[in-house]
Image (cartoon, helix red, strand yellow):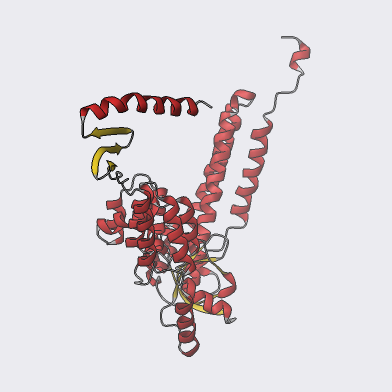
Amino acid sequence: MSNKDDKRPPRVNKLAARLLGQTANLERNVSENPPTPIASQRNVTMPGQLGAFRIEAQKYQAKIDELQRQLDEAVAKQADGGSDVESADLRARLAQLQEASRAEVEALKAALDEAALSAGVPFEAPVARIRKIPGRQRQLTNAERDALYANLDSNKLVTPVTLRPTPDGWYEVVSGHNRFDFYVDRGRATIPAVLDLSDDEHADRDAFYANLLHNTLPDYAKYVGFKKLLDEDQTLTIADVAKHAGVPRTTVANLMVFGELPAEAIRLLDAQQDKVGRSAAAELAALHAKGHTEGVMAAIQAIVNGTSSQSEAVAMATRSARRAVAPRVAPAPVTVRSGRATYCKVHQAKKVLRLEFTKDVDAELAMNEITKVLQALADGSKK
């Protein structure tokens, strides 16, 4: 190798250098400024600590996961000019950071386990830090909403709402959406609440099951909830979700009939879920399956508009379907007379025309004339 080659600066893996710099800063921050354990910070309510413990643990684990991702990326880039030494150095720094943070992470988890014992203890949650997730709320009729508001205007909230803390410092409503709406509408600053620390992926399911306990939950809303569970996990069967909900399998299976209605009907029911019950939906779905969609849509529109009850609308669609498929009645035979005597009887069934003469001679004489008439009709059909 020439002297010129010896003087060439070594090739630098810029990605590895950048990652090493990042981990060096993180390591220094942890060693020089270790995070104050949550448990030793200023006292807050136990439910508040629950949320803080959970969120802090998630953030710490996310930081370690990101460093691990960067390490994997650096190792994969070794072939692009990097060296084993650089990757080893990066790996060592990551190990140091993990070791420095392990005690804090374990402390957070231990504190979370200890604080979780108080889950379900009511506390005053700030209304301004609570948000609703679309699809979880049980829709009330105007009468139900008025009754709820009248009750809460005169009485305290006996059943707290159920909230789930989120990593960004907010709370999501799991159960009690309509009670929360009341507190928002009345301008209340806080609302009695309890925390739910179960898995985030089950939040929608938990909200649906909580609503399912209400007798007033419309059949269509139950269908939407069960269908969502089945769509989100393709391995689940109707029997599975029925078991989880604590209801008979036939209950869930019967609700699935809503999915057999026309797509336009589904859009109408999404907006007004309390209008059509399962029984009416089953009868209308059966008519739709036989091709009587127009009558089915007219019936559902009448129900939604309030011009017909469910039973009246189903009867209307059924009558419409019967008229559409009414069997064609064969015309009665026509008798041709000569005076009072029967000359000939004419029978027609669909495309068959049969002439029955009283005398053979009359049939022979009529044959030529009938043939001429038929030929004239045939010639006329060509024009």
Which is more toward the observer, 10 or 82? 82
Residue at 34 percent of width and 48 percent of height:
325
Q: Is residue 284 left or right of residue 165?
A: left
Instruction: Give the image location of residue 86, x and y in percent.
Output: 61, 31
Q: Is residue 54 above or below residue 154?
A: above
Instruction: Give the image location of residue 346, x and y in percent.
Output: 29, 38
Which is more toward the observer, 203 or 117? 203
Residue at 40 percent of width and 70 percent of height:
119
Residue at 26 percent of width and 28 percent of height:
363
Q: How many marks?
A: 0
The residue at the far top in this view is 1
Q: Is residue 248 above or below residue 231?
A: below
Residue at 58 percent of width and 34 percent of height:
73
Q: Is residue 360 above or below residue 311?
A: above
Which is more toward the observer, 166 or 159? 159
The residue at the far left in this view is 359
Q: Which quadrant of the figure has residue 7? A: top right
Instruction: Give the image location of residue 41, x and y in percent.
Output: 55, 70
The residue at the far bottom in this view is 154
Q: Is residue 373 above or below residue 280?
A: above
Instruction: Give the image location of residue 265, x and y in percent.
Output: 46, 56
Which is more toward the observer, 297 or 135? 297
Q: Is residue 335 left or right of residue 8?
A: left
The answer to whether residue 41 is seen in the rendering is yes
Quarter of the image with the C terminus is: top right
The answer to whether residue 45 is seen in the rendering is no
Quarter of the image with the N terminus is: top right
